[in-house]
Image: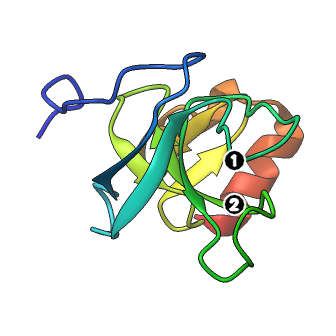
Amino acid sequence: MSGEDEKQPENTDEAEYSEEKRYFSCKLCNLHERYDYFGKSPEFVRNYKLKEDSYVLEDPFAPPKRGEYLILGAHCVQCKISVCKDSNCSFYINGTYCMPCAKSCRYNFPKLVQEKLNRII
């Protein structure tokens, strides 16, 4: 499935938070998990704005209303597929890249980033 065919939640600065159950799926490892919010400013996180639209889950292991959260994943800046934050699936540099895209465009990254990426691929 190409990234263009994938239905993405609406973006970004507007809060998207409801009681409706929504699910995030990583297209590389098939992680399938409920998420609470997609965007940059989850209302349950105080005074914090994410750098990219992300799938966010209120931390199920923390007491309620503590503002703790887990970032499940984001969309690859190159191909737009949804990808989790596991280091086998994605790499972050000024945005999330799926590992196939990170590998294919790694020579465009700064030298130190290339070295780090080469160690994990």
Q: Quadrant of residue 25?
A: bottom left
Question: In the picture provided, is 108 more to the left or to the right than 29?
Answer: right
Q: CA distance from mark 2 to mark 1?
A: 8 Å
Circles 2 and 1, Cβ within 8 Å, touching? The answer is yes
Residue drawn at (73%, 30%) of the image: 109
Q: Nearer the viewer, residue 110 or 32?
A: 32
Disc number for residue 44: 1
Q: Quadrant of residue 48?
A: top right
- Report the amino acid beneath label 2: Tyr
Q: Quadrant of residue 58?
A: bottom right
Disc number for residue 76: none
Quick one: SS at disc 1? loop
Task: Please determine whether, in this image, residue 12 is positioned above or below residue 104.
Answer: above
- In which quadrant is the N terminus drawn? top left
Mark 2 surroundings: few (<14), some (14-19) or many (≥20) residues within 10 A: some
Residue drawn at (72%, 66%) of the image: 119
Q: Nearer the viewer, residue 65 or 71?
A: 65
The answer to which of marks 2 and 1 sits earlier in the sequence is: 1
Residue drawn at (35%, 29%) of the image: 79
Q: How is the image coloured?
A: rainbow
- In which quadrant is the C terminus drawn? bottom right
Quick one: SS at disc 2? strand
- Given the current orientation, which residue lies at the most extreme bottom position? 61
Question: In the picture provided, is 12 more to the left or to the right than 107?
Answer: left
Residue bearing mark 2: 69
- Report the amino acid beneath label 1: Phe
Q: Where residue 44 appears, x then y in whole percent?
A: 69, 47
Q: Nearer the viewer, residue 51 or 106?
A: 51
Q: Where residue 32 appears, x then y in whole percent?
A: 30, 67
Q: Nearer the viewer, mark 2 or mark 1?
A: 1
